[in-house]
Structure formats: structure tokens, C-alpha cells
Image: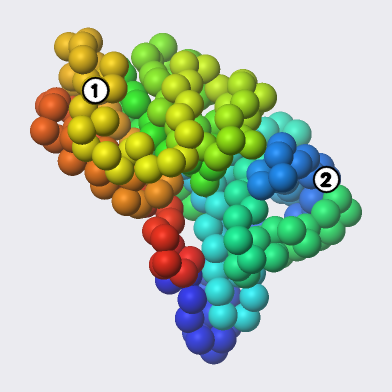
Amino acid sequence: MPSAPKWLFDAVDLLISKLPMVAITDVELLSPSLKKIRFEGDFKKLNFPVGSYIDFRVNETDVRRYTVSHFDLAQGFLETIVHLHGEGTGRQFMDRLNIGDTISMNKPRGERNYYNSTAEQFVIFGDETSLGLACSFQPVLKRNKKQFQYYLELDEENQLIPEKLGLEHCNVFPKNGLFQNENWLEKLPIFQTAAWQDANFVLTGNAKSAQTFRKVIKQKTKAKSYLHGYWLEGKKGL
């Protein structure tokens, strides 16, 4: 529900649990289109499974969702990585947030389907909007000794951001429609070896790219895939 009448969001705000006011204590522009924001508050009683997210009410009639990229319960902070794209309400809201601001925040909620603890191999696909999820995944995968690979389609200005974020086993590609080309996808190394035939694929970012990737996965492997398109060209607030 990215958009709804003001009266409905007002009613929802009265019913859902809110956190005490949180403070923005650090802002880092990773690139002209990527912003990392740190929020400090009382998060000690919360759980943060892989893919936990926060719904921000960015104006009276719109909500936008952002993944928690990193959290530290002992020090009382969490971080999100925001893609500053276009001139929409989400971008305008996040652009305005700066160190010293305080905001009211909905409690983070968990995404239960991203991480299957019984799987031994993971392939995580996405774009700039998926970098928070990628950062959320890596500590869990390393701690549990899972094999993993990232496949990321990124704009030229963001090609080196995964390395800057400390992401490992990254395959970075230009954002030029390759992941919407079935013939090209079939030739990826991940499909040329039996070693990854039973991996869990987590497909996010551009919905069209993720859907095409899943189609090839079903044709070429016995792997399980989980698809959550974060955005679709021409679709407001997906």
C-alpha cells in the first residue's frame, strides 16, 4: 500500500506500534544516487531478521519501504541505504534527512522468506535498491558458513559501491537490460556448473529483471527462488 488517502494512513498510525523519537546521527553519500543513513534510538527489544524493513510515511498520502542494512543493538543504531532516484516523494523525503534531525519511526518488521537456514548456497540478485538487503544478508551467511554470490546490475557511478560496502563474491554488471535477456542469462557461469544447481536464489530490485531471471532459473536448474520486485518502470511506489 504505497499510496492511500490521508484518513486511512492517519487511522493506521493510531493502530500500529511506533518507536520513541529516533535521531539521525550519521549521513554518508556513497555516490550521487546512494545515501546511507544511521538512526539511533532504543532498539534493544526488537528483532532484525534478514530483510527487516521500515515503512516511512513520506507525506500525508504516501509510504515508502526501506530495508535495514545494518544494526547494532548494543550501541543502539540501525542503518539504511537509500537509492536517490528520480524526483518522487520517497527521494524528496530521504534527501531532506540530515544529521541532527529527529523523526517518528514505525517499528521495523521482519521478512521471513528471504533466508532459508537449511540451504547451503545462496545467490542474491538486485540493483541499487537491493544493496541494503545485500548488506543484511552477508553477516548471517558468513556466520553460518554458507556459500554465496551476489549478482548486481548497477549504474556506472555505483559499480564500485559493493566493494566500498565490504560485500564479497560480487558479480557486478551494467544496468543496460542484460538481465531481461533470457539468452544472455542462460550463459551466466552460475548456470554452467552443477555446483550451484540447488542454490536458493533471492531476486529483488527491478521487477522485470527479477522475473526474467527466475524464468531462466526454472528452465535451467532445480533451485528454489524467492522473488520480490522492489520497483517497476512506470509503476508508482512499488
Residue drawn at (62%, 26%) of the image: 160
Quadrant position of the N terminus in the picture: bottom left
The kind of secondary structure element at disc 1 is loop
User: Which of the 4 image quarters holds residue 119?
Assistant: top left
Residue drawn at (53%, 58%) of the image: 65
Residue sticking out furthest to the right: 100
Mark closest to the chain's N terminus, 2 or 1: 2
User: Which of the 4 image quarters holds residue 114?
Assistant: top left
Question: Residue beneath label 1, please?
Answer: 187
Residue drawn at (83%, 45%) of the image: 25
| Residue 200 percent across, percent down from the top left | 27, 28
Report whether residue 88 is seen: yes
| Residue 104 percent across, percent down from the top left | 71, 64
Q: Is residue 47 left or right of residue 81?
A: left
Give the numbered dot on residue 25: 2
Q: Which amino acid type is marked by label 1?
A: Lys
